[in-house]
Amino acid sequence: MKVRLPNNGGAGNMQQMLAKAQKMQADMQALQADLEQREYTANAGGGLVEVTVDGKHTVKAVKINPDAVDVDDIEMLEDFITIAVNEAIGKAVAESDEEMGAITNGLNMPGMF
């Protein structure tokens, strides 16, 4: 006994899905390259410390206002630097997630970005 599967263009649909997946992958790679070139800046302590990171989360610059330097309270300066770095990285991650999500329509695709 032979089983007949309905012919509803399965091969054509598969090719369309593959083409869409390839386009999505190309779009994601282009966006990832663009995101890696962008810079994100954050500050802490009311602007006493400013940190800039790139899309790869590499610290590109740290600016410290001389008013932030108190030799009796180095710990506060360290905290400001930590806060600013984490906030700048958070901005980079949030923008990447938002823009990648627009390409993938919210699909969670581990390892893709």
Image (tube, rainbow, N blue to C red):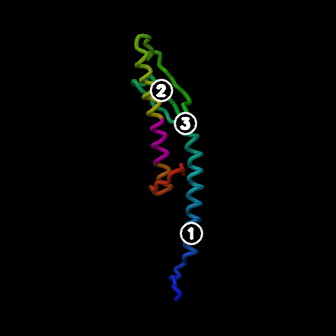
Write the residue at 44% across / 11% down: 71
Write the residue at 54% across / 31% down: 59
Residues at marks 3 and 2 touching, judged by CB atoms closer than 8 Å:
no
Q: Say what amino acid the circle numbered 3 marks.
A: Asp
Q: Is residue 66 above or below residue 3?
A: above
- Which label lies toward us, 2 or 1? 1
Q: Which residue is mark 2?
A: 50
Q: Which numbered disc flags the more N-terminal residue, 2 or 1?
A: 1
10, 83: nearer the viewer: 10
Write the residue at 40% across / 24% down: 45
Q: Residues within 10 Å of mark 2 (few under 14, many from 20)?
A: many
Write the residue at 55% across / 39% down: 56
Q: Residues within 10 Å of mark 3 (few under 14, many from 20)?
A: some
Q: Which residue is mark 1?
A: 16
Q: Residues within 10 Å of mark 1 (few under 14, many from 20)?
A: few
112, 45: nearer the viewer: 112
Q: CA distance from mark 2 to mark 1?
A: 48 Å
Helix, strand or loop status at disc 2: strand
x and y percentages locating residue 105 in the rendered image: 46, 57
x and y percentages locating residue 39 in the rendered image: 54, 36
x and y percentages locating residue 112 in the rendered image: 54, 51
Q: CA distance from mark 3 to mark 2?
A: 14 Å
Q: Which numbered disc flags the more N-terminal residue, 3 or 1?
A: 1
Q: Main secondary structure of the magenta part?
A: helix
Q: Say what amino acid the circle numbered 2 marks.
A: Glu
Residues at marks 3 and 1 touching, judged by CB atoms closer than 8 Å:
no
Residue 110 among magenta residues? no
Q: Which residues are magenta?
A: 89-97
Q: Which residue is mark 3?
A: 54
Helix, strand or loop status at disc 1: helix
